[in-house]
Amino acid sequence: MTNGTTFWRSIEAVHDVVYFTPDTKQRYEALGLKGYWMGYMASRSAAVGTPAPELVVALFQGFAPRMVHRALPDAWSMASRDEVLATRYDLARDALAPATEGADVARLAKELTAITHGIDFAGKPLAAAHHSLPEPDDDIGRIWHAATVLREYRGDCHIAVLTSAGLDGAAANALAVAAGLAGDQQRSMRGWTEDEWAAAISRLATRGWVDGGGTITDTGRSARQQIEDTTDRVCAAGIDREATGRTITIEEPLLALARAVEASGVVTYPNPTGVRRP
């Protein structure tokens, strides 16, 4: 496989259009959901079914539990799972269509989908749930579906690495902010209180990863990079040889698509995902 950086950041950009397209909130509210975050929680977790908030807290990891509980399970009584999923795919198609002009969408759809069939999903529940959804009939839909499976696959691997490093959701987010991967609004965007955030920074300071003011140290930068490198290794270990070859051959057109997404203004950087531009 490649060193992972370009491929995974490009996958993230393609997937992320459903979070940042301007009418996301309005589209979910049209189904009966209330506010952006209820749409986010329901739409991202709907692949699992209509999960309880405790399960979603476990799957997403970085959000304060109270934030998930404000959205779920109420969302499932306000809109059907099928409506939520259909709206999410339509958001993706509408956002990606301008960025795919001139791209070989048939090839991208074929290659990305083939990569998802070469993955070991053991221990990657959110990726497996998305992979179990029916593949769309259209190429743009298939591109986004495959990118989402791959994005959640790396996300599942990343959460495993974060938890094995002893980082809970608040500390993981605080470290991302300290490393310059996310903005100062990350605390409120993820639902953590000021006290919880301060406690997270204190835990990081105890490890020498940040100083008393929350500024990252050289040790912290090294630790954060090691988390990324370990995530890439864990991801690579679960992708078979044929799929690995496809990640190399598709990287250039995938990167072109990711940069077209950024140029369209749908996804900007830095953003709350904490992933750098491809």
Image: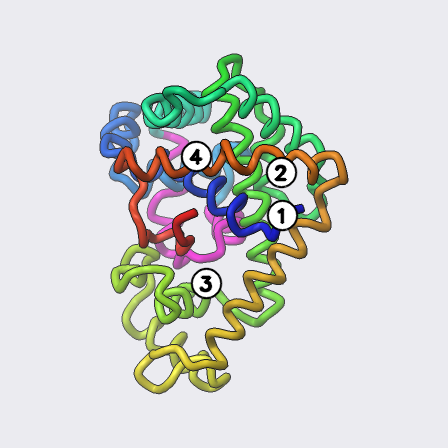
Q: Which residue is mark 3?
A: 169
**Residue at numbered disc 2:** 247
Please identify the residue farthest to the right as the structure is shown: 241
The Cα atoms of the two marked residues, 3 and 1, are separated by 29 Å
Q: Amino acid at mark 1?
A: Thr
Query: Residue at horizontal 48%, vertical 50%?
Result: 60
Quadrant location of residue 211? Answer: bottom left
Nearer the camera: disc 3 or disc 1: 1
Q: Can you give x and y, in whole percent of width and height, for residue 25 in the image?
A: 25, 34
Nearer the observer: mark 4 or 3; the answer is 4
Asked if marks 1 and 2 touch (Cβ < 8 Å), the reply is yes
Q: Which residues are magenta?
A: 53-77
Tell me if I can see residue 203 in this picture: no
Tell me where residue 77 appears, x and y as whole percent. Answer: 38, 30
> What is the spatial separation of the Cα atoms under label 1 and label 2, in whole angstroms?
7 Å
Q: Which dot marks residue 2?
A: 1
Q: CA distance from mark 4 to mark 2?
A: 14 Å
Q: Secondary structure at mark 4?
A: helix
Tell me the distance, in whole angstroms, between the alpha carbons under discs 1 and 4. 16 Å
| Res. 211 in view | yes
